[in-house]
Amino acid sequence: MFQYLALAKDKPWQPGPYAGVELKILHKHEATGGVVVLRKFEAGTTVPAHTHPLANEWAYVLSGEWEESGVTHAPGTLFFAPKGERHGPHAAKGEVISLTVFDGPLTVV
């Protein structure tokens, strides 16, 4: 049996770090500050290049198309950005939903 269960339908969408981005925090690890989130990007949203200085990031595209460096990524794509490494910009061609894991606090620079 799993020790933790989260139902996305029970979690509210909340503003993300950029306009046009919303987060559903599915789990937060109290000791590390790491989070598992659903991220929703409104169609036409572009997230500028950035870094996460305190966490590695894994993002799995569940729906929609995400463009980066002229390449379009569809559902089933997994991205990894090491802690402190610059990545982006990301452009949502339509609404995009990803399941994203940060293994430390979600900070953006």
Image (cartoon, rainbow, N blue to C red):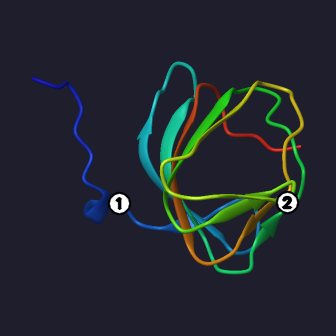
Seen from the viewer's position, the closer of residues 10 and 68 is 68
**Residue 60 rendering spot, x and y as whole percentages:** 53, 45
Height in image: 38 above or below 65? above
Q: Which mark is residue 70?
A: 2
Looking at numbered disc 2 in the image, what kind of residue is underneath it?
Gly
> How far is the residue under mark 1 from the one under mark 2?
34 Å
- Viewer-proximal residue among 79 and 109: 79
Task: Write down the residue under mark 1.
Answer: 11
Assign the N terminus to one quadrant of the image. Answer: top left
- Residue at the (88%, 59%) spot, across then down: 48
Tag of residue 57: none
| Residue at the image point whose x is 56% and y is 46% from the top | 77
Query: In the image, which is nearer the foreground, mark 1 or mark 2?
Result: 2
Label 2 crowding class (10 Å Cα cut-off): few <14, some 14-19, many 20+?
few
Packing grade of label 1 (10 A; few <14, some 14-19, many >=20) is some
Task: Using the image as rendered, state which of residue 82 and residue 5 is in the foreground.
Answer: 82
**Amino acid at the residue labelled 1:** Lys
At 54% from the left and 68% from the top, the residue drawn is 64
| N-terminal-most mark, 1 or 2 | 1
Residue extending farthest left? 1
Residue 81, percent from left and from top: 74, 32
Classify residue 65 by image quadrant: bottom right
- Residue 80 lies, with reference to residue 99, above or below; the image says above
Q: Secondary structure at mark 1?
A: loop
